Structures are given as C-alpha cells and as structure tokens.
Amino acid sequence: MNNWDRTNSIAQFVRDRRKKAKLTQVELSDFTGVGLRFVRELEQGKPNLMSDKVNQVLLFFGHTLTPTPISDEARRNMGK
C-alpha cells in the first residue's frame, strides 16, 4: 500500500489555496460538491483518489490535472 504524502504538490496546492481563500474544509466540500472526507484525504495526500473528483476541486481554483514531464532523475527514483 502506498504511503500518504501530505507534501505532494496537489495536496499542498489545495490546502494552500483553501487557506488563502479563508475557507474551511467543510466550505470547500460544499462549494465543490465533493464529500468532506474526500477533501480531507486530498489534503492529506492519499495516493489513490479519483481524478474526476480531484479536478472538481482544482477547477474551483481555476486549475486542472495535466500531464507534466518529469526529469530522468525523478523517473529513476520512481522505482525506489
């Protein structure tokens, strides 16, 4: 089972944007139409969340999931 990573870029982005917007997790859940548990798990870096729901939250902040190239070094470290 993958470990949760609170420091992953999506978790940090959502948490930071929510706080800058002065929203609670409950309010973000209400505004985006996803469950409170989902918002909490997203901000805690749960590794296997549904991408359509992640996009629902990101769209609230004017963003979407997109493919991003990774460096050769990052690619080598993925197997560790």
Image (cartoon, rainbow, N blue to C red):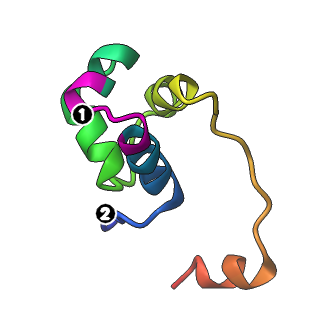
Q: Residue at x 56, y 80 (%)?
A: 79
Residue shown at 29% from the left, 36% from the top:
39
Give the mark nearer the N terminus: 2 vs 1. 2
Query: What residue span does the magenta drawing correspond to?
Result: 19-27
- Per the image, label 2 sits on a secondary structure element best described as loop
Foreground pick, 2 / 54: 54
Q: Which residue is mark 2?
A: 4
Does 29 lie within the magenta span? no
Q: Which mark is residue 24?
A: 1
Residue 3 in picture, x, y percent from top left: 31, 68
Q: Residues within 10 Å of mark 1 (few under 14, many from 20)?
A: few
User: Considering only vertical position in the picture, is 41 above or below 22?
Assistant: below
* Image quadrant containing the N terminus: bottom left
Residue at figure coordinates x 41%, y 67% from the top left: 7
| Spatial separation of the CA atoms under disc 2 and disc 1 | 21 Å
Magenta stretch: residue 26 in it? yes
Amino acid type of disc 1?
A: Thr
Horizontal placement of 72 versus 62: left or right?
right
Residue 17 as seen in the image, left or right of residue 28: right
Q: Amino acid at mark 2?
A: Trp
